[in-house]
Amino acid sequence: MNTQLLHRRIVLVLLDIMAVCIASIMPLWIRFELNYKDIPKIYLSSAWHFMFINVVIALTVFYFFRLYHSLWAFAGTAEAQNIIAACFLCTILNFIGMRILDYPIPRSYYFMYVLILTCIITASRFSYRIIRGVRHKSRNKRNGTRVMIIGAGDAGNTVIKEITNSSYSTMTIKCIIDDNSGKWGRYIQGIKIVGGRDKIVEYAALYGIDEIVIAIPSANRATMKALVEICKETSCKLRTLPGIYQLVNGEVSVSKLRDVDVEDLLGRDPIKVDMESIFNYVRGKTIMVTGGGGSIGSELCRQIAGHQPGRLIIVDIYENNAYEIQQELRHKYPHMDLVVLIASVRNTNRMNTIMKEYHPDIVYHAAAHKHVPLMEVSPNEAIKNNVFGTWKTAQAAVQNGVKKFVLISTDKAVNPTNIMGASKRICEMIIQTYNRQYDTEFVAVRFGNVLGSNGSVIPLFKKQIAAGGPVTVTHPDIIRYFMTIPEAVSLVLQAGVYAHGGEIFVLDMGEPVRILDLAKNLIRLSGYKVDEDIKIEFTGLRPGEKLYEELLMNEEGLTDTENKLIHIGKPIEFDEAKFYVQLDDLKRAVEAECEDVRPLIKEIVPTYVPRYDEDIEM
C-alpha cells in the first residue's frame, strides 16, 4: 500500500470515529430541544458508555462495506447505497447492543442516529468529489471548451456526467437541446434543457458554443442529416456517439465520441440485408476472394469470416495488404481454416493451380486496378489486369467446377468515359458470356463510390484540411453516388444469394451527392469556415472523369429483388462470337504495348466515349 493511500484511509477512520461520536450524542441533544443540560443523566450515561462499542461496530461494518476501499473521487450511486446500507446495519447493531446491555435510551434515538450518521459519512466521502468538481468547473469556465449537448436521454446523461466529473476534460457544458417539449426548462445534473433543434443556432450564439455533441446514438441517417445541417450554421465543431449498440453495452463515454463524418450527411439509413440467408449461403463452403487485401476485398473477407465458411482463401498480389488481413482474421477467428496466397490474377497457371488445389465453391473477384486517372495514363495495364485478369480467373473457375463467380463491378461501367469504367464493362460482358456457356453461375455487382476506400475523396479532403488547405475539388457541379464499405460488401454477399446467373445487381443508393457540398460540410464539421479558414480550389476534371455517373444503361431497365434496395439489370445482348475475336485482338494489342488501345475498346464497348472527345456532352 502506498503512503498516500494509507494517509487517506487513516483520515477516513478518524472522520468516522468523530461521526459515530457526534451521531451518538446529537440525537439526545435534538430530542431535548437543543439543551444539553436538559438531557437526563441516565440517557447520557447510556450513550457515553456504549460509544466505544459503537465505534468498533461502525469501523468493522464500514470495512466490510468497502467504505475504505472505494475511489471516492469517482463515487456514484453504488457507493451511496453502500453508505446507506452500512449505516442502517450499524443502527440495528446499536439497538441490539443497547438492549442486551440494558442501556435505557429514547425510542426516537435510533431514527435520528441513522439519519445523522448517514449524513455525516456521506458528506465526508463525497466532499472531495464535490470540491474537485467545483474546481474543475471553475477552471473550465476560464479556459475550457464551451459545449452544447443534443439529446437529453441516457446517452446524453452519461456524456454530461463524464465531462462534468473527468479531471482530464476541458469542456464546460452550457446547455442541452432535446426535441421532447416535456423536458424543456428542466435540468440534467444542473444543466438546463433550453429547447428543441430550432434553438440550436440561437443558443450556440448566446453561449458562445465551441463544440456541439450529438448524443443520440439511436438516430437514423435522416435525423442525423437534419441535425447536422442545422449545426453547420453555427460554425461549431461537431462530435457524435457511434451507435446504439454502445449504449446497450454500457460503452457510452467521452472516449467514444467521434467527429461527425460525411457519412452522417448521406441522408439515408444503412442498407439492410438478410444476414440469415447470407449465413446459410456461406456456411461450410470454400470461398475464394481475389484482391482480398484491398478495401472491398478485405471487408468481404471480414464478413465472410463471420459467417462460418468451411475455408476462406484470400488471394492478393500485394503482400502487405494480404498480411494485414491475415493477422486480423487469425486473431479474431483463430479456428477458421484460412489460406492466404500471393498471386496475380493475370497469371493463368497460378490461378488454375490455386483453384485445382482448393476447389472453391464461390469466387468473389475483387482484384482490379480502380484508380481512374492512373488508368488513363496506363491503359494497357488496366486492360491486362481488369479484363484479362477477370477472363483468366473466370476460365480457371469454369475448369475447376466453381459453383458461383461474383464480379465486383462499378457504376463507371455505365456509359464509360474512362479506361477503368470501360474495362469493367468488358468484364461484365465476359461473365455474361461465360454464364450462358458454362455451368458456373456468373454474376456482377455494380455500385458507386465507396466511402473510406483506397483512393476515396474523403481521406484526401481530411488530409488537406489537417494541412490547413486548400481543399481541391475538380469541378463545382460534379456529383457522385456514395455508399459505405460494409454496405457494398453486404450487397455483394446478398447478390450471391439471389444470383441464378447472368444478372447485374445494382444498389439503390438514394440521391447523388455534390462533391463540393461534401468538401464544404467536412470543412465546417472540422470547426473551420469555408473560404476564410480553409479555401476550396477547383482543379478541373481529371483524365477520364465525368460530372455524373449512372448506375444503369438505358437499355438495361430494372427489376426488383426481395430487398427493395437491390435491383437487377437486364443483360444487354451482343454478338458473342464477335466479342471473342475482339478480345483476342485486344489481348495482342496490350501485350504489344499498343500506343492507343482506346479505338479497340470502343469497338467492344460502343457506349465508351473518352472524355476528351469534342462531341461528349456533360
Image (spheres, rainbow, N blue to C red):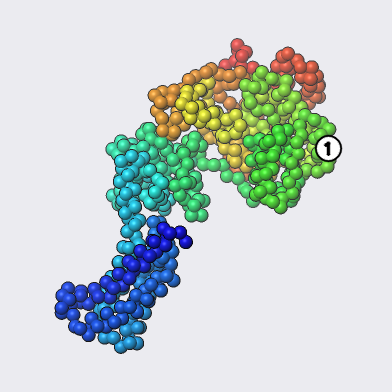
Q: Residue at x 47, y 23 (%)?
A: 470
Q: Residue at x 64, y 22 (%)?
A: 374
- The x and y percentages for residue 407 are 70, 35
Tally of numbered discs: 1
Q: Secondary structure at mark 1?
A: helix
Regarding residue 398, the answer to whether it shows in the image is: no
Relative to 559, residue 541 above or below: above
Q: Is residue 225 visible?
A: yes
Mark 1 = which residue? 353
Q: Is residue 120 left or right of residue 239?
A: left
Residue lying furthest front: 3
* Rendering quarter of residue 570: top right
Q: Is residue 229 left or right of residue 384?
A: left
Is residue 347 shown left or right of residue 169? right
Crowdedness of circle 1 by 10 Å Cα count: few (<14), some, many (20+)? few
Image position, residue 359 (x, y; %): 81, 43
- The vertical placement of 466 against 47, above or below, is above
User: Of residues 592 and 51, which is closer to you in this image?
Assistant: 51
Residue 506 percent coordinates (x, y): 62, 35
Viewer-proximal residue, 325 or 410? 325
37 above or below 392? below
Question: How far across and down, in percent of the image, does residue 151 sit?
Answer: 39, 47
Tell me what residue is drawn at x 47 percent, y 50 percent. 252
Q: Residue at x 73, y 13 (%)?
A: 595
- Identify the image quadrant of residue 481: top right
Q: Amino acid at mark 1?
A: Thr
